[in-house]
Amino acid sequence: MFQNQYYHIFSGSSIEVLALKDSLDQINIKPIIKDQGESARLAGFGVITPLLQEVYVHKDEFEKAKILMNQLF
């Protein structure tokens, strides 16, 4: 279900993701931040890419987010 409803728009460091999240919040888009490094740490597994996070937005907000991404990057 998640894969059909949300689109991946960005992968990067936690600092870049925080800046993007703030920009998305300003245009009323609530992104989902996926941090596999933190998930692995909490589960007790090793971390391959500790600072890499992924940003997803709902499919209904994707076009609006894409415009913002073009302005930022």
Image: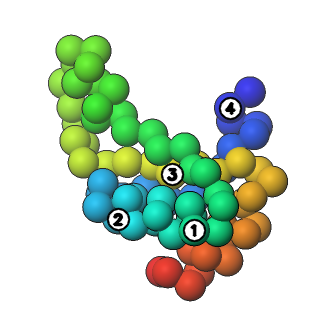
Cα distance, mark 4 to mark 2? 23 Å
Dot 4 amino acid type: Phe
Would residue 16 be found to the left or right of residue 73 on screen? left
Q: CA distance from mark 3 to mark 4?
A: 13 Å
Q: Is residue 38 above or below residue 69?
A: above
Q: Neighbour class for label 1 at 10 Å: few (<14), some, many (≥20)?
A: few
Does the CB distance between marks 3 and 4 fall below 8 Å? no
Residue displayed at 56% across by 84% down: 71
Which secondary structure, mark 3?
strand
SS assignment at label 1: helix
Q: Quadrant of residue 27?
A: bottom right
Taking depth in this image into account, of 49 and 14 the one nearest to the observer is 14
Question: Does residue 36 appear in this view?
Answer: yes
- Looking at marks 1 and 4 on the same chain, the residue that comes earlier in the sequence is marked by 4
Who comes first in sequence, dot 3 or dot 4? 4
> Which residue reaches farthest bottom?
71
Q: Is residue 70 left or right of residue 55?
A: right
Q: CA distance from mark 3 to mark 1?
A: 16 Å
- Earlier sequence position, callout 2 versus callout 1: 2
Write down the quadrant of residue 43 in the picture.
top left
What is the number of the mark on residue 53?
A: none
The residue to which callout 1 is attached is: 26
Q: Amino acid at mark 3?
A: Val
Which residue, given by chain and number where applicable, does mark 4 sit on?
2
Alpha-carbon span between mark 2 and mark 1: 16 Å
Q: Amino acid at mark 2?
A: Glu
Q: Would you name the residue on which mark 2 appears? A: 16
Q: Residue 6: where, in percent of width, then height?
A: 69, 44
